Image: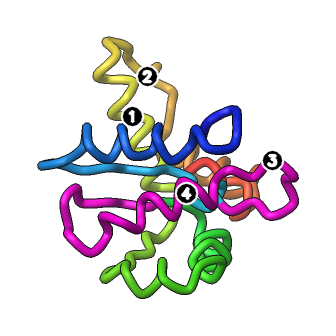
Amino acid sequence: VAEYTGQTAGKTRKKVEEAKGGVLFIDEAYRLTKAEDAKDYGAEAVEELMRDLDTGDPLVILAGYPAEMQRFLKANEGLARRLQLSFEFPNYSCAEIVKIFEGKVQRSGFQLGPDVSLTRLAEDLERLTTPSWRGQRN
């Protein structure tokens, strides 16, 4: 999204062309339709993206939280019609988060101390955080 009206379509087109033959991944895509922003140029980006959604080149992946993505898709009638597939991935469990942590520790060349219990870490994560807090970090 550009700074001034009229610049967004060109910038978006450039990114689409760069991604031809591959994938264009847009994380937090719902931010393109923030209606409360007086300088909302995201709609211009969405219109430009829609020109290529029917072709499949590039493959466009729009990612974001489920509720926000539903709002995003409802903001433009043609958008939802052009997107053929939708996936919702569940949040990681506390045990899975701890396994990911363990892998990152090992790949970084560190070792957990002998008294560290992965089961205890998962239990503490469950006890000391909320599902909403964990979901925002998944």
Which residue is identified by label 4?
Answer: 29
Earlier along the polypeptide chain: callout 4 or callout 2? 4
**Residue 12 vertical placement versus 116 (above, below):** below
Separation of marks 3 and 1 at Cα, in angstroms: 44 Å
Separation of marks 3 and 2 at Cα, in angstroms: 49 Å
| Relative depth, front residue between 10 and 24 | 10
Disc 3 residue type (three-letter): Lys
Q: Foreground mark, 3 or 2?
A: 3
Question: Circle 2 — which element?
Answer: loop
Q: Which mark is residue 39?
A: 3
Earlier along the polypeptide chain: callout 3 or callout 1? 3
Q: Quadrant of the N terminus?
A: top right
Question: Circle 3 — which element?
Answer: loop
Which residue is identified by label 1?
Answer: 102
| Residue at 20% across, 67% down | 56
Separation of marks 4 and 2 at Cα, in angstroms: 37 Å
Q: Is residue 92 visible?
A: no
Q: Residues within 10 Å of mark 4 (few under 14, many from 20)?
A: some
- For the record, the magenta segment spans 33-62
| Relative depth, front residue between 44 and 66 | 44
State yes or no: residue 58 in magenta: yes
| Residue at 62% across, 36% down | 2
Q: Position of residue 5 (x, y in %)?
A: 69, 43
Classify residue 99 by image quadrant.
top left
Q: Foreground mark, 4 or 3?
A: 3
Q: Foreground mark, 1 or 4?
A: 4
**Proximity of marks 1 and 2: CB atoms separated by less than 8 Å:** yes
Which residue is identified by label 2?
Answer: 112
Q: Foreground mark, 1 or 2?
A: 1
Disc 2 residue type (three-letter): Leu
